[in-house]
């Protein structure tokens, strides 16, 4: 099974490199709209390789789930501006003060880069108050980057996966990148550290009716020992310990991450 998934992933990357050649990667990745700090994260987040693995292509309807401050949005929006539809499924404006601040900052980013980003459709996805952000069976590709731990912390994970599965077209893809922990972690450990086991992510996806199609080590980091005092936030870019052991954590880099591709069964 592991060999089959690896070969499927390798084939997907090769095919994606062929079909995505027309997408404006240079503009999206190297444009002045991206700060030096954000571009520096590319070393760990590998946006082009990751999006190609998930099968991003022109003409798609893409939904980025829980985009936060928009690190990935500033790559996706220029790519899709003239090549498809980008939907940002963000917090509900009725979801509390943190949700409002996060959504407000995101909307400011869109406004400041409107000419480059084009029309990004912003919808609310924050269970239980907002669970149907788009029409059922309307999305080709859903993307969630380092979000599953937050959904677990809010006791929303099953509802989030269900909402995503409902939005996907038959044969549609969910791409997940998540801080990766060992399979023996308890749920509380996952909530507290943000490291989530692959087993847990696969379980949540399967409960929603999605099937693991392929996995990749694009975003792996073997230097990450995963035993940090403040979980993933100990590492860059957060560096929650401040100057304490700062050089050590900078040398480790960002967290070790799983990269999983799920598919909704075709009719």
Image (spheres, rainbow, N blue to C red):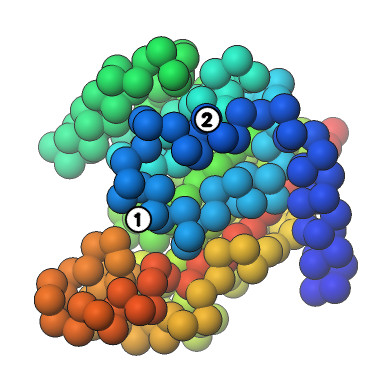
Circle 1 packing at 10 Å, graded few (<14), some (14-19), many (20+), is: some
* Residue carrying label 1: 150
Residue toward you, 260 or 162: 260
Q: Quadrant of residue 245?
A: bottom left
Describe residue 128's horizontal placement relative to residue 52 as left or right.
left
Q: Secondary structure at mark 2?
A: helix
Q: Looking at the image, is mark 2 or mark 1 nearer the viewer?
A: 2
As drawn, 265 above or below 257: above
- Residue 209 visible to an observer of this rendering: no
Circle 2 packing at 10 Å, graded few (<14), some (14-19), many (20+), is: some
- Residue 104 visible to an observer of this rendering: yes
Residue toward you, 192 or 247: 247
Residue under the image location 24 percent in, 24 percent down? 108
Residue under the image location 72 percent in, 42 percent down? 55
Residue under the image location 28 percent in, 20 percent down? 112
Residue toward you, 159 or 222: 222
Measured as percent of width and height from the top left, residue 46 is found at 54, 55
Measured as percent of width and height from the top left, residue 249 is found at 29, 78
Q: Quadrant of residue 57?
A: top right
In which quadrant is the C terminus drawn?
Answer: top right
* Residue carrying label 2: 27
Measured as percent of width and height from the top left, residue 140 is found at 68, 31
Q: Quadrant of residue 253?
A: bottom left
Kindly report the distance in space between the C-alpha atoms of the residues bearing marks 2 and 1: 31 Å
């Amino acid at each position: 099974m592991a060999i089959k998934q690896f070969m499927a992933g390798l084939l997907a990357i090769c095919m994606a490199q062929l079909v995505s050649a027309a997408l404006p990667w240079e503009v999206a990745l190297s444009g002045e709209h991206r700060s030096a700090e954000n571009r520096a994260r590319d070393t760990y987040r590998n946006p082009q390789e990751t999006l190609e693995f998930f099968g991003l292509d022109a003409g798609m309807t893409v939904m980025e789930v829980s985009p936060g401050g928009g690190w990935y949005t500033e790559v996706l929006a220029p790519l899709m501006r003239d090549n498809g539809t980008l939907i940002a499924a963000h917090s509900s404006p009725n979801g509390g003060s943190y949700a409002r601040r996060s959504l407000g900052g995101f909307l400011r980013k869109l406004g400041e880069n409107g000419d480059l980003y084009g029309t990004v459709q912003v919808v609310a996805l924050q269970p239980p108050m907002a669970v149907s952000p788009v029409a059922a069976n309307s999305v080709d590709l859903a993307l969630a980057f380092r979000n599953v731990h937050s959904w677990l912390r809010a006791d929303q994970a099953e509802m989030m996966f269900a909402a995503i599965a409902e939005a996907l077209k038959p044969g549609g893809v969910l791409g997940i990148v998540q801080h990766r922990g060992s399979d023996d972690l308890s749920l509380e450990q996952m909530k507290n550290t943000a490291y989530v086991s692959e087993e847990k992510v696969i379980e949540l996806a399967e409960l929603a009716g999605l099937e693991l199609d392929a996995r990749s080590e694009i975003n792996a980091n073997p230097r990450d020992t995963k035993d940090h005092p403040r979980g993933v936030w100990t590492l860059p870019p957060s560096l929650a310990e401040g100057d304490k052991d700062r050089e050590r954590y900078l040398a480790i880099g960002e967290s070790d991450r799983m990269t999983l591709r799920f598919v909704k069964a075709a009719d």
